Amino acid sequence: MKYSLILLLACITVGCSGNDSESHNAQQQALRNRTLALAYIDSGMMAEASEKLAELEVALPDEAFVYANQGLVALRQNKLEEAGTLLERANVISPNQPEVALLRGEVAMLTGDFTQAETILEEAIMAHPENIHLRWARKVNIEHLRVIVGSIPKNIVARLALIKELLKEEEFKDAKTNLDVLLAQEVIQGEQAQGLFDGALVQIEAGQARVARGQVIGLDNVLKPTRAWQQSLLEVAGPPGTIGHPIRAFINTPIPQQLPTEIKTVKFTKDVTTIKPSNKKRVLLVESPEQIALVEVENQFACTVIPIDWNNDRKVDVLYGTTNG
């Protein structure tokens, strides 16, 4: 059956110069290299990650993402001096960027420069006071814990850490208030957890800060296997695993927004004068757009029609089969 079809196809017209096209291709290649570099880092394939990051360094020399992740790769290979140099380079491009600051602080601590680590993190917190991960990295400071608990009050890990620091400072009233919040949130489940919780309250009433803190530490350990505790840790500290977390997005390079596809209606028409009777078998042979033939089988009992090129010489016979073979 032969149809004359008029198709109005949907398409996106890209009116761009050669330079625009080259720029688009370069952006797409950079995005591919970014994805591959992160996948290699996640898989522990540091040599392969370094290759992709080196390509990105050539394409995007002013992108802090590149040097930060190169620093992470060096950190995981225990090349602390190289890691520090690369991370400082990232910091020059994007000062006090939170994820870079966390890596810089980690390198400083591993090299024993705890004062420098504290300075790095505190400066980053001043620049980004809303960043929970930065404040958690300075959880020894009770004020940072107060901010975290105020921002995410249902976080078990942060509240337990705050209670421990409050007891260290012998701030019994605030410690008890926060323990009561945990009870109200119904996170104290099981006989062991309840016993430690009650023990902490008894010691707080007795003014025994050290013993009460020990009870809270025990409660923290009992709650660790629970889903709520694990989710809380993820919220404040990020995913667990190998040392350091990669930076997953470009910091200094804007990613162009992809324009939505324009949808158009597709219309079909047919030429009814070309419709063949339906009681015969046919096969359409197409050699090229100009060489098309519709072969009709005369045998009224034909049930199958097959085009065959016997010796691959592009000369096709049409065979047909009937119910009798």
Image (tube, grey):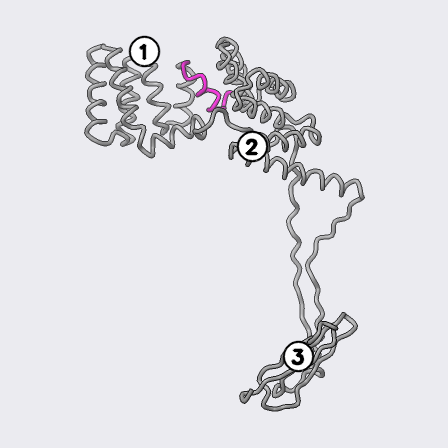
Question: Mark 2 sits on what residue?
Answer: 248
Quadrant of residue 281 within the rendered picture: bottom right
The C terminus appears in which quarter of the rendering?
bottom right
Rate crowding at label 1 as few (under 14), some (14 to 19) or many (20 or more) other CA atoms within 10 Å. some
Secondary structure at badge 3 equals strand
Q: Where's residue 78, x and y in %?
A: 52, 20
Q: Earlier in the sequence, mark 1 or mark 3?
A: 1
Q: Which mark is residue 283?
A: 3
Nearest to the observer: residue 179 or residue 252: 252
Residue contact between numbered discs 3 and 2, judged by CB atoms under 8 Å: no
Is residue 3 in view?
no
Magenta highlight range? 129-141
Nearest to the observer: residue 9 or residue 58: 58
Q: Residue at x 73, y 78 (%)?
A: 293
Q: Earlier in the sequence, mark 3 or mark 2?
A: 2
322 within the magenta span: no
